[in-house]
Image: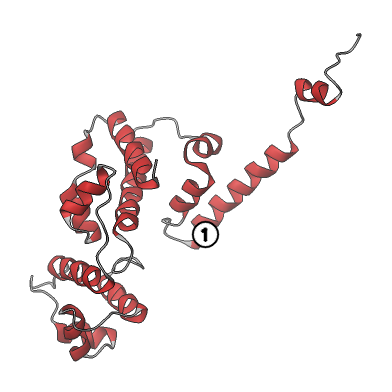
Amino acid sequence: MCELTATAERVIDLAATLGRSRDDVLNAAELHLATGVPTAVVESLLRGESAGEPNRQERFRQRLKVIQALDVQGNKRKHSQSAIARQTGISRQQINALANGERKPTMDHCALIEAFFGRPAGFLMSEDAAAVGGALLRVEMSLLKEVARQDKPAPTLTSLLAVHGVEGIAARAALLPTDGHRDRVLRMIERLMTESESEPETGGARNAEAGGTTPGR
């Protein structure tokens, strides 16, 4: 099972505990707006199907178009290319060429434009599956907060490790807002691993190492 599919199933299960439907939390149109990935591609990925990948220029153009349409100024007008150029330091000519697919975007271009629109690093260039997977992780975190607000028992670190594994926990830690939060997760995992290593072996394990004999025989 791929990571995206596994995350989607966890989101569906969490939603069910809150009395919400699959369609409510896995809304392809909303995920499109959150990621810039075309709605049809989002739907295919949620079904566990491969939808192919656009080239770098096309992916950049798709997502830039989405954020330009969504992020408007106080007067409800879109940010002009001149305003984007002025704030990012990218020339207006380059902005126009990037938007029209006439120039390949660099990592610097992407980082500057993502910062201007307040989007996370990698928004403009991450592969479609990774982008949707990241959005699902944010949905999952939001649902977990809803569960916590309903005074449901919080999952222990051991149970989280059993369900998500170290990689899954690390992926969620990367979405936390500050280095301090991420460091706390890392220390908790290290403490758990240390405790596991120091746990005494069971009697059965000791007997097996001794040849399977038991006291008194």
**Percent position (x, y) of residue 34?**
23, 57
Taking the image as shown, residue 61 lies to the left or right of residue 135, namely left
Question: From where the camera sits, is residue 146 visible?
Answer: no
State the residue at coordinates (69%, 44%): 194
Could you say whether the residue bearing mark 1 is in a helix, strand or loop?
helix
Q: As drawn, which residue projects farthest toward the top?
A: 217
Q: How many marks?
A: 1
Local packing at callout 1 (Cα closer than 10 Å; few below 14, some 14-19, many 20+) is few
**Percent position (x, y) of residue 138?**
33, 50
State the residue at coordinates (80%, 22%): 208
The residue singled out by tag 1 in the image is 180
Residue 174, compared with residue 85, is above or below; it is above
Taking the image as shown, residue 137 lies to the left or right of residue 171, namely left
Colour setting: secondary structure
Taking the image as shown, residue 37 lies to the left or right of residue 125, namely left
The residue closer to the viewer here, 130 or 185, is: 130
Question: From where the camera sits, is residue 7 visible?
Answer: yes
Q: Quadrant of the rendered structure where residue 158 is?
A: top right
Q: Quadrant of the rendered structure where residue 111 is?
A: bottom left
State the residue at coordinates (69%, 39%): 195
**Percent position (x, y) of residue 187?**
60, 51
State the residue at coordinates (35%, 67%): 122
Specify the quadrant that holds the N terminus: top left
Disc 1 marks a residue whose amino acid type is Gly
**Percent position (x, y) of residue 8?**
32, 41
The residue closer to the viewer here, 174 or 208, is: 208
The residue closer to the viewer here, 190 or 97, is: 97
Specify the quadrant that holds the C terminus: top right
